[in-house]
Amino acid sequence: MFRILVLDDIAQEGIDLLEATKGIEYEVRTKLKGEELRKSLNEFDGAILRSGVTITPESLQGNTRLRALVRAGVGTDNIDKPAATRRGIVVMNTPGGNTVSTAEHTFAMLLALSRNIAPAHQSLVEGRWDRKAYMGTQVAGKTIGIVGMGRIGREVASRARAFDMKVIAFDPFLTDDQAESLKVERVDTVDEMLPLIDYLTVHTPLTPETKGLIGMAQLDKVKPGLRVINVARGGIYDHDALVKGLESGKLGGVALDVYENEPCTDSPLFKMPGTCCTPHLGASTEEAQTQVAVEGIHLLINYLKTGEIRHSVNVASLDPKTLDELRSYLNIAHRLGLLVHQWHGGGIDHVRLLCRGVVAGKDTRVLSNAFCAGLLERVVEDANVINSEMLLRERGIELTVEHNTEQGAFTSSITVEVSGGGKTVSAGAAVLGHEMPRLILLDGYRLESFLDGRLFVFAHKDVPGIIGSVGTIFGNNGINIAQMAVGREGNAAGGDAIGVLSLDSDVPEAVMKELMSIDAITQAKLIELPAAGELPSWMS
Ligand SMILES: NC(=O)C1=CN([C@@H]2O[C@H](COP(=O)(O)OP(=O)(O)OC[C@H]3O[C@@H](n4cnc5c(N)ncnc54)[C@H](O)[C@@H]3O)[C@@H](O)[C@H]2O)C=CC1
Ligand SMILES: O=C(O)C(=O)COP(=O)(O)O
């Protein structure tokens, strides 16, 4: 049974979906913050939220249960993503669901500003019939500047064109070809468009580059009377510059849907003429809310039940097809991580992963995540496929991933090498048949061994009788050997070799000592791997 927490008001259709899904329990707890939020998050496997709740590092402090946070909407700026990643929590959003509604709201604001809709309505509420005071401006023939030509920016552009407006756009990722096909004029900087435009609308996240995009300095560059609209994120326009711009007439109107601190009920702008403000309503339509709630709940349930990751903003996506194709390779990558961690046994500073054959052409980021999870799992509490690569890099461990799509002896194989403390160990694995993970390489020696359960690994001199001596000690102590593999240097006896025995039971300390006393053995270790067919919780 998975438990899901609904942290914000989401559409009933999303709640109905939770209700109808077997194996899911849910609770709605809105307006949570502080300690109450922290405690609640630790009682659930997944949570869904909108912009009404803020997930800080403190909200996730001590969390051992939560696996996924889904934003029913676009902006995930209210979720501390590094903190979530560190805790192994995948963060997903529903990017397309509210695009059209937000573009429509932008246009509603633009038209409301142009025709003084809000104050004119208010004048009637107050019993005044004053047509002269509310003379407007026609939008046809005017020029609009759009900063951010992503999903919403493009929808706004197409609506502006339908209103016979000229569109000038800035987005660092907008190419000339795209601009041509979108019928917009592309510019290289925001400053370039400022003297040319009658309206400015922004559709970017709040980033260090977009924060204060319109500030005091920009007021000197604008065409006087510019009307500005922000339905993206508070802070993109500098608040004081907006006030100053309206007072001086440099700005002819300000429409805001979003604020630096929300909820925001107290701003000098609300009372100024020439403004039109709404309380973050861009995505608040029945259509958008139904779509983001249903999609968000699907994302949560699919991740918890199958491991499928879509629209993640903090880890690589893992769609059902890729998950299916890679499942057995994720499994061996994870097992290799566990194996080399134990075989190396010391501090690691460099990790190398080589994907070879068919698998090298797939999404190897998830494979390296699975390997890193295995590598850290026994030393870092809660290391998993979501956070392990970040944890590895935070510990100053360098990770390199190489690909070679040429097939070797196997259709696909994964080889890993870890170094540190003057020691390097390596291991390779492949999947035989349908789902049989096999160790095919250890410290450069070719062999073929099981990659599960309890393994006794011993480096030794390839001299006659060594296998017999090891077998006798295990036999005398009632420890059954299920499978045995030996790899050695070249074809001749007498060199260095490595042996891997699969054991049916544990090896007591005293027996290990006895084994280590065999002269020809130079190094031996007992390695614990998941049982055959056992998958880590994040993959099952
Ligand atoms: N008011 C509301 O209720 C809603 C607000 N939003 C906000 O709208 C914004 C845009 O959403 P989408 O279009 O869906 O996102 P998107 O990711 O499709 O588009 C964002 C665009 O901004 C561009 N960009 C990033 N940095 C830039 C910069 N410094 N200068 C110019 N362009 C830059 C990106 O290249 C991208 O094309 C987001 O911040 C989102 O949170 C989204 C939905 C509802
Ligand atoms: O999707 C977004 O980024 C939004 O800003 C919409 O916010 P909301 O879900 O309406 O709180």
Image (tube, grey):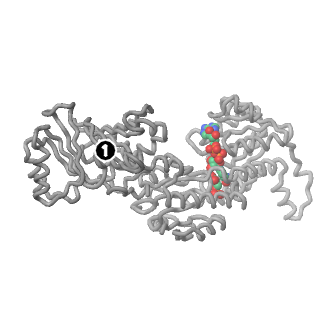
Reply above or below: 312 against 279: above
In the image, is 64 to the left or to the right of 452?
A: right
Quarter holding the C terminus is bottom left
Q: Secondary structure at mark 1?
A: strand
x then y, percent, for residue 340: 28, 44
Q: Quick one: 344 or 220, which is closer to the camera?
A: 344
Residue 249, how many percent across, how many down? 77, 41
Q: Is mark 1 within 8 Å of ligand 1?
A: no
Which residue position holds label 1?
Answer: 439
Q: Observer-nearest residue: 208 or 265?
A: 208
461 shown above or below 377? above
In percent of width and height, residue 140 lies at 86, 40
User: Which quadrant holds residue 412?
Assistant: top left
Residue in the image at 61% along x and 41% along y: 212
User: Can the viewer see residue 313 in this picture?
Assistant: no
User: For the residue carrying disc 1, how many other residues have a C-alpha within 10 Å: few (<14), some (14-19), or many (20+)?
Assistant: many
Residue drawn at the location 58% of the way across and 38% of the way down: 209
The residue at the point 25 percent across, 54 percent down is 454
Please report the residue visible at 62 percent of the width from the left and 55 percent of the height from the top: 73
Q: Measuring from the top left, give residue 455's x and y in whole percent.
A: 24, 51
Q: Is residue 49 visible?
A: yes
Q: Who is closer to the viewer here, 167 or 178?
A: 178
Determine whether 15 is above or below 141 in the image. below
- In the shown orientation, is residue 59 left or right of residue 418? right
> What residue type is disc 1 on?
Leu
Counting the numbered discs, the total is 1
Query: Within the displayed image, which quadrant is ligand 1 positioned in?
Result: top right
Q: Nearer the viewer, residue 13 or 111?
A: 13
